[in-house]
Amino acid sequence: MGERVRLECVFDAEYEDLYSVKWYKDDEEFFRFLPKDKPANQFFEIQDIQVDMSRSSNGTVYLQNTSRAAEGTYRCEVSADAPSFQSISSEKFMAVIDPPVVIPQSAAQISPWTLRLLLLVCFHLILYQ
């Protein structure tokens, strides 16, 4: 928790111009990229989501200071420009896991194997299902 997460939407507009890339968390829009607008990036504030606007653009969004509340279904929607305005979207559930760390009461109880295990457990995991 408190880590940065990169959400990436990979798309091929083929022969059509890109109109927009929109990002949603649990069906609520929080980021929009419209290449013809100035500025091209727009952030819509929703609870528990912090976007790093200096790094986010096009199909990539960086979330910062993630917490368990950032867990949810994220959807990317890509739309072509006129005349078709065709849209395609994809969504994935992001689970934010903060595993418990159990530390032995004295240093004498720590074996080399346990120490390696503790080092692994100390990393916060962000899993995509």
Image: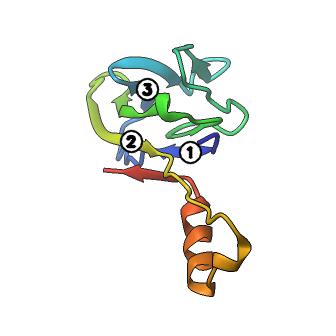
Closer to us: 114 or 121: 114
Tag 3 secondary structure: strand
Residue at 63 percent of width and 45 percent of height: 3
Q: Is residue 102 above or below residue 62?
A: below
Establish if 29 lies above or below 89.
above
- Of badges 1 and 3, the one in the foreground is 1
In this view, 81 is above or below 102: above
Tag 2 and tag 1, C-beta contact below 8 Å? yes
Position in image of residue 95 (x %, y %): 39, 43
On the image, which quarter does residue 71 sit in?
top left
Residue 120 position by quadrant: bottom right
**Residue placed most toward the observer, 50 or 108:** 108
Q: Is residue 41 left or right of residue 21?
A: right
Secondary element under disc 2, as helix, strand or loop, is strand
Q: Residue at x 43, y 28 (%)?
A: 23
- Separation of disc 1 and disc 3 at Cα? 17 Å
Give the quadrant of residue 52: top right
Bin the neighbour count of mark 3 within 10 Å (Cα to Cα): few under 14, some 14-19, many 20 and up: many
Check disc 3 and report the residue beneath it: 22
Amino acid at the residue labelled 3? Lys
Q: Earlier in the sequence, mark 2 or mark 3?
A: 3
Residue 5 numbered mark, or none: 1
Determine crowd level at label 2: few under 14, some 14-19, many 20+ residues with C-alpha closer than 10 A. Answer: some
Q: Relative to 62, is 125 on the left or the right?
A: left
- Viewer-proximal residue among 15 and 95: 95
CA separation in Å, label 2 and label 1: 10 Å
Is label 1 in a helix, a strand or a loop?
Answer: strand
Looking at the image, tell me whether mark 1 or mark 3 is earlier in sequence order: 1
Q: Which residue is mark 2?
A: 94
